[in-house]
């Protein structure tokens, strides 16, 4: 069982209610196209695929926020090296998601999926006020995107085992940060699949 931080005493975290008619699934940087997931992240990726497929079956929007870096411009490449280069398979959602015409793919050049992208506009036009956020790295792009969601007034749910940390910090610390700083309801993938049943 994945680590779940203690829920804060807020109405959102103490509730198990969710309005699926105003909820979207946000997939953050689960990339690799036909190349498959980053080694070691297979379980996280499988949980993400399960959430996406369940959401589609309920007719919910699925939005992919994907690295799409420009060589020679993006500062992130100086820190982490070449990854998620726009136009390559490494910047595409995993093939296992079977991205379809009803999905939305939002390219991003920074950690935060809301920064200088169409993400917030797309979610507002979809009538979304709640996000089920999944993906990686927990302490980088997921954390920064949850910050953007919180600042923009979205409620968030994170299934802990549909996120993963492999670059910086610990999974436990990242999940605890979400609950304490962004009022994120951290649960298991099993709980999210129950929401979507």
Image (spheres, rainbow, N blue to C red):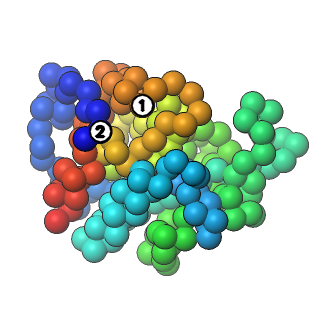
Residue shown at 59% from the left, 33% from the top: 167
Closer to us: 101 or 178 = 178
- Residue 188 placement (x, y as % from top left): 25, 45
**Residue 171, numbered circle:** 1
Quadrant position of residue 74: top right
Residue 178 in sight in this render: no
N-terminal-most mark, 2 or 1: 2
Residue 33 in sight in this render: yes
Residue shown at 58% from the left, 52% from the top: 38
- Residue 138 placement (x, y as % from top left): 47, 36
Packing grade of label 2 (10 A; few <14, some 14-19, many >=20) is few
- Residue 127 placement (x, y as % from top left): 33, 57
- Tell me how far mark 2 sits from mark 1, CA to CA: 9 Å
Q: Secondary structure at mark 2?
A: loop
Horizontal side of residue 84 vs 128, given as left or right: right
Residue shown at 78% from the left, 45% from the top: 82
Residue shown at 50% from the left, 31% from the top: 139
Query: According to the image, label 2 marks what residue?
Result: 2
Closer to us: 67 or 21 = 67
Q: Are marks 2 and 1 in contact (CB under 8 Å)?
A: yes
> Is residue 104 placed above or below 68 in the rendered structure?
below
Horizontal side of residue 63 vs 16, given as left or right: right
Residue at the far right: name it.
72
Packing grade of label 1 (10 A; few <14, some 14-19, many >=20) is many
């Amino acid at each position: 069982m994945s680590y779940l931080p203690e829920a804060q005493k807020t109405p959102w975290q103490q509730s198990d209610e969710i309005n699926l008619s105003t909820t979207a699934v946000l997939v953050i940087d689960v990339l690799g196209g036909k190349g498959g997931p980053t080694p070691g992240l297979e379980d996280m990726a499988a949980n993400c695929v399960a959430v996406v497929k369940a959401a589609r079956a309920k007719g919910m929007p699925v939005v992919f926020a994907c690295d799409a870096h420009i060589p020679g411009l993006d500062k992130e490449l100086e820190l982490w090296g070449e990854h998620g280069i726009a136009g390559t398979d490494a910047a595409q959602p995993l093939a296992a998601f079977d991205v379809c015409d009803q999905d939305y793919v939002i390219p991003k050049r920074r950690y935060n999926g809301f920064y200088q992208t169409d993400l917030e506009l797309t979610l507002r036009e979809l009538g979304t006020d709640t996000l089920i956020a999944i993906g990686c790295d927990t302490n980088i792009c997921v954390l920064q995107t949850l910050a953007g969601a919180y600042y923009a007034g979205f409620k968030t749910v994170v299934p802990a085992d549909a996120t993963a940390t492999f670059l910086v910090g610990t999974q436990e610390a990242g999940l605890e940060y979400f609950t304490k700083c962004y009022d994120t309801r951290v649960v298991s993938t099993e709980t999210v699949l129950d929401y979507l049943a």
